[in-house]
Image (tube, rainbow, N blue to C red):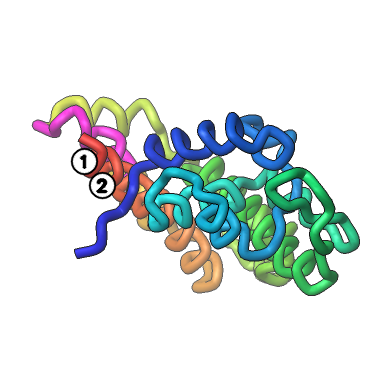
Amino acid sequence: MTYKFSIEEKNDVIHKLAEHYPKTFFDNPKLRVPLMKNVTTALQRDGFPIASELIGESVDWYQSHIGYQHQLQAGRKRIDLAGRESGAVTELEERATRKKITEYNEKKLADRNLFDPIKTATALVDAQRIAQDQLRKIDAPSPKIEISTMNRTAAKSPVRPELTRLYEAVLAANMAMSVATGNNDMQVAVTAAALGVVIKEAQRVIDEARSE
């Protein structure tokens, strides 16, 4: 079984990279700039004293941050380990990045609107993932799920502390998926949003267990 490095381990490597290569790597996501191609190989050749697998995952984690993704604009220069120009971001890379940013924003909207199917549907229309006429087919505004009720239910159940948020997410998903939206497209959208939160919380529990 392949070992999966924790977020803490990867962030620690990023901090060390920022110290060792201050012109190239930055702890603050807002300061990050596009890195040269094959930067992981360059780090290994430069003798950076971290296992290659951990370097690779840490660099991937560094580049996956939404702050870094926003910097990948066509024509913007990439930099090497010394901070010198080393190639540039292509239009194809920028288009791929725009897709990732759109998916990231949609996920945030879905998480925020999990308890309100109407808001979730509206967000998906705004993101052009479903047609405007589908939104009009909803029979009537559905009542919001009472979060306080969900929390009271969770409090009465014998759930381990580290599983509380996951348990609440499952309850919320069950409630959201039980709300009638009036058409199948809406139900699919709400279900996807609800289950997305459950999966996210489940992964958090797994990551925390591995880091112990």
Please state which of residues 19 and 45 is positioned toward the viewer in this rendering.
Answer: 45
User: Does dot 1 land on a helix, a strand or a loop?
Assistant: helix
Lateral position of residue 116 relative to residue 72, left or right: left
Range drawn in magenta: 158-169
Quadrant of the snapshot with the N terminus: bottom left
Asked if the magenta segment contains residue 160, the reply would be: yes
- Decide if residue 117 is in sight here: no
Residue 89 x/y as whole percent: 81, 63
Q: Residues within 10 Å of mark 2 (few under 14, many from 20)?
A: few
Residue 50 x/y as whole percent: 41, 46
Residue occupying the point 55% across, 41% down: 112
Amino acid type, mark 1:
Ala
Q: Which residue is mark 2?
A: 206
Residue occupying the point 36% across, 56% down: 178
Query: Does residue 38 lie above or below 22 as drawn?
Result: below
Residue occupying the point 60% across, 62% down: 138
Quarter of the figure with residue 177: bottom left
Lateral position of residue 107 relative to residue 25, left or right: left
Q: Which residue is mark 1?
A: 209
Q: Are marks 2 and 1 in contact (CB under 8 Å)?
A: yes
The majority secondary structure of the magenta stretch comes to helix
**Residue lying furthest left in this view?**
158
Asked if the magenta segment contains residue 191, the reply would be: no
**Residue lying furthest right in this view?**
75
Residue 163 x/y as whole percent: 21, 37
Residue occupying the point 27% across, 42% down: 205
